[in-house]
């Protein structure tokens, strides 16, 4: 009996050790040499856009529509950190410093340059930004509600952030093991913006309209004052319910020199590509996720932002990396 018990205990210990080794090996496989950790996302389908019963949705979050993602992908477990950015780029542009805080004050163009440098390492993967559909699919993590959990438990926003970013991974993950999908910093995605895109979006693997579409940009904030999307004055799109009614100027142009904020957060730099035509913004990229300086409703998983071009740089805007195995020719 003792021999049987010893054998059983030995087998159990060996089995647990083997299981731990498999977990460690899998974890190592989902981490690259820049220290970026990834979560494997399996193909599937979901309802994209305004969640049922959500009264805070803008028109560009409708109609809710079924989307199928046909291929697996790996997405960053965390928002890209300042240490990870610096290990690749050799500098840290962030306004709110901290190695384990998300990198911010980076434009979409600069995010692309970071990804180009990762791709130049030829480590067997292709690195890119997520599509808007991939981002929302991962953020929802199987949920159909406006938030993928209790907001104070999963996200940093203006009600709990103490007016700054926080180190990644301090809040609870969503059901698929992803951190800070809602809050901390907003995140660049690859798609261009069209206010009406959801009406014509492909049902399988949508990538956004070619070249972007028309329509006024999404949430951002009023010019001056405490505004929306940050308490230092902003230059973003209109708050919920339409443009300001207090006589403030149109927020779609670039800020004057020395402006304290632009689209939320502390001072950042924009560029000349916030285009206007007939009073409407055109050809603009999409931003997702909500941030440390935003009201809670901006962190809803269906919320969309678009009010400036790919050179926008502000302290509440970063990104998350996606990778896929390189296809061998």
Image (tube, rainbow, N blue to C red):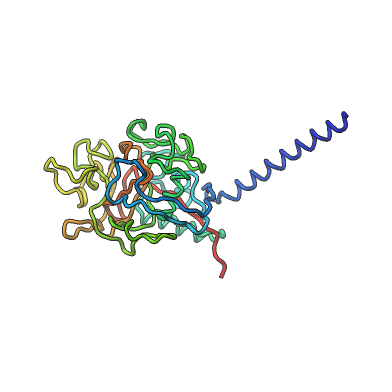
182 or 269: nearer the viewer: 182
Residue in view at x 31 percent, y 49 percent: 305
Residue in view at x 34 percent, y 52 percent: 107
Image quarter of residue 145 = top left
62 or 180: nearer the viewer: 62
Q: Residue furthest bottom?
A: 329
Image quarter of residue 311 = bottom left
Q: Is residue 216 left or right of residue 5?
A: left
Q: Residue furthest top?
A: 2
Above or below residue 193? Residue 3 is above
* Residue 49 percent coordinates (x, y): 36, 49
5 or 52: nearer the viewer: 52
Q: Is residue 263 left or right of residue 189?
A: left
Q: Residue furthest front?
A: 53
* Residue 117 percent coordinates (x, y): 47, 58
Quadrant for the C terminus, please. bottom right
Total marks shown come to 0
- Determine if residue 238 is in view: yes
- Determine if residue 99 is in view: no
* Residue 79 percent coordinates (x, y): 44, 45
Residue in view at x 40 percent, y 32 percent: 152
Quadrant for the N terminus, please. top right
Q: Is residue 193 left or right of residue 279?
A: right
* Residue 34 percent coordinates (x, y): 52, 50
Residue in view at x 49 percent, y 43 percent: 178
Above or below residue 303? Residue 280 is below
Q: Residue furthest left?
A: 247
């Amino acid at each position: 009996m003792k021999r049987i018990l010893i054998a059983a205990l030995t087998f159990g210990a060996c089995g647990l050790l083997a299981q731990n080794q498999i977990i460690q090996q899998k974890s190592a496989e989902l981490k690259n040499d820049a220290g970026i950790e990834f979560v494997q996302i399996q193909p599937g389908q979901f309802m994209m856009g305004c969640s049922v019963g959500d009264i805070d949705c803008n028109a560009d979050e409708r109609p809710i529509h079924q989307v199928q993602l046909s291929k697996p992908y790996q997405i960053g477990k965390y928002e890209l950190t300042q240490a990870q950015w610096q290990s690749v780029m050799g500098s840290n542009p962030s306004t709110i410093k901290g190695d384990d805080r998300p990198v911010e004050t980076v434009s979409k163009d600069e995010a692309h340059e970071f990804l180009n440098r990762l791709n130049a390492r030829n480590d067997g993967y292709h690195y890119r930004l997520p599509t808007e559909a991939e981002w929302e699919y991962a953020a929802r993590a199987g949920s159909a509600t406006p938030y993928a959990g209790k907001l104070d438990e999963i996200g940093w926003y203006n009600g709990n952030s103490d007016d700054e970013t926080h180190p990644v991974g301090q809040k609870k993950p969503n059901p698929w093991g992803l951190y800070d999908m809602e809050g901390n910093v907003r995140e660049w995605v690859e798609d261009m913006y069209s206010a009406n895109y959801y009406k014509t979006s492909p049902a399988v693997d949508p990538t956004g309209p070619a070249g972007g579409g028309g329509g006024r940009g999404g949430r951002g904030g009023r010019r001056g004052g405490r505004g929306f999307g940050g308490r230092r004055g902003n230059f973003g799109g209109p708050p919920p319910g339409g443009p300001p009614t207090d006589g403030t100027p149109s927020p779609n142009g670039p800020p004057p020199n020395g402006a304290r904020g632009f689209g939320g957060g502390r001072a950042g730099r924009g560029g000349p590509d916030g285009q206007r035509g007939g009073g409407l913004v055109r050809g603009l990229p999409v931003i997702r996720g909500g941030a440390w300086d935003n009201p809670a409703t901006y962190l809803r998983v269906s919320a969309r932002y678009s009010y400036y071009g790919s050179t926008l740089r502000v302290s509440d805007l970063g990104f998350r990396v996606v990778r896929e195995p390189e296809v061998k020719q």
